[in-house]
Image: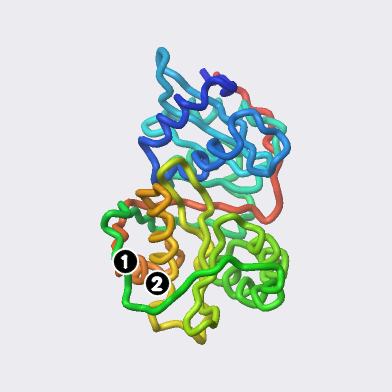
Amino acid sequence: MLREAGPDDGAALEAFLSRHAGTSMFMRGNLAAQGTQEREHRHGTRFMLHEEGAEIVAVAGITNAGHVMCQAPGQPEAFFEAVAEAFTGRAVAGLGGDPEQVAALEAALGLEGADFILRRDLPLFELELAHLRLPDVAMTLRAPDPADVAWLSDWFVGFLTETELAGASEGMKAAAAYVNARDARLGLVGGKPVAMTNFNARAFDTVQIGGVYVPQAARGQGYGGAVVARHLEVARETGINRAILFAASEYAVRSYERIGFKAAGSYKLAMLRDPVIVSRRVVT
């Protein structure tokens, strides 16, 4: 029922995933950056394909770091059981994707009673950048550098606490990773950093926005929407024409709607407290 993607499957896999772009950006970004055969980088992904004839109709992936994703519209329980069989012996750290599909994956992988630190359906938003609205905020952007890590660690404590993506103790580690990220940007007003943003996935003409944060003292002035809008304005000049994100709060939703984002469903994130080894499954 399933076969592992090979080096020649990239184009067909991208074509399928791009038809479901809103809930596929992590897989698309990993595919674009790492291909189908990378087995060392943490974002390298093993893709399992389900085909009807020569056409891909469903896919599941597990990264080298143990994050499981799928794009399997309309697939029966047997598909998810086959995914569990394929991933037997692998350590699963979390799951992401369409909420119904993630629920089916959790059941097939035997994770329904597992200890999750985060298990949320997040509102998903999309924007064609031709319709981007730039707010009236005098903001400039700059890339972060290693000298910013000390104070950024405080921002990341707030960010990780509010989003529940990790414990506050990870703030310094997250800040150090952020300053080395290709697409990380700080928003400055009057020369002072007031917001941060990043792209956590890229695939051809589409980016997925992540890591957006405004510290408490700077909120209520439109900086969250402004930093994302300025970042996308620059990206648009390089050929990016579509953006996707999921929002972690009502404050974030309002910020994104003001710059043109429209609701497009939801995305489920489920992060385990400790990785769980997938037990052997029997597919009948």
Q: Which residue matches tag 2?
A: 226
Numbered disc 2: secondary structure: helix
* Most distant residue in the front direction: 237
Q: Is residue 197 left or right of residue 92?
A: left
Q: Position of residue 79 (x, y in %)?
A: 49, 27
What mark, if any, has residue 161 been given in the picture?
none
Numbered disc 1: secondary structure: loop
Nearer to us in this view, 29 or 27 = 29
* Most distant residue in the left direction: 131
The quadrant of the picture occupied by the C terminus is top right
Q: Residue at the spot x=70%, y=47% of the render?
A: 275
Q: Position of residue 89 (x, y in %)?
A: 72, 32
Q: Amino acid at mark 2?
A: Ala
Q: Position of residue 139 (x, y in %)?
A: 43, 76
Label 2: how many Cα within 10 Å (few below 14, some 14–19, many 20+) = many
Count of marks overlaid on the render: 2
Nearer to us in this view, 7 or 20 = 7
Q: Is residue 128 above or below residue 80?
A: below
Q: Are marks 2 and 1 in contact (CB under 8 Å)?
A: yes
What mark, if any, has residue 259 been given in the picture?
1
Q: Residue at the spot x=59%, y=29% of the render?
A: 36
Q: Amino acid at mark 1?
A: Ile
Nearer to us in this view, 129 or 61 = 129
Q: Residue at the spot x=43%, y=55% of the render?
A: 235
Nearer to us in this view, 67 or 186 = 186
Q: CA distance from mark 2 to mark 1?
A: 8 Å
Label 1: how many Cα within 10 Å (few below 14, some 14–19, many 20+) = some
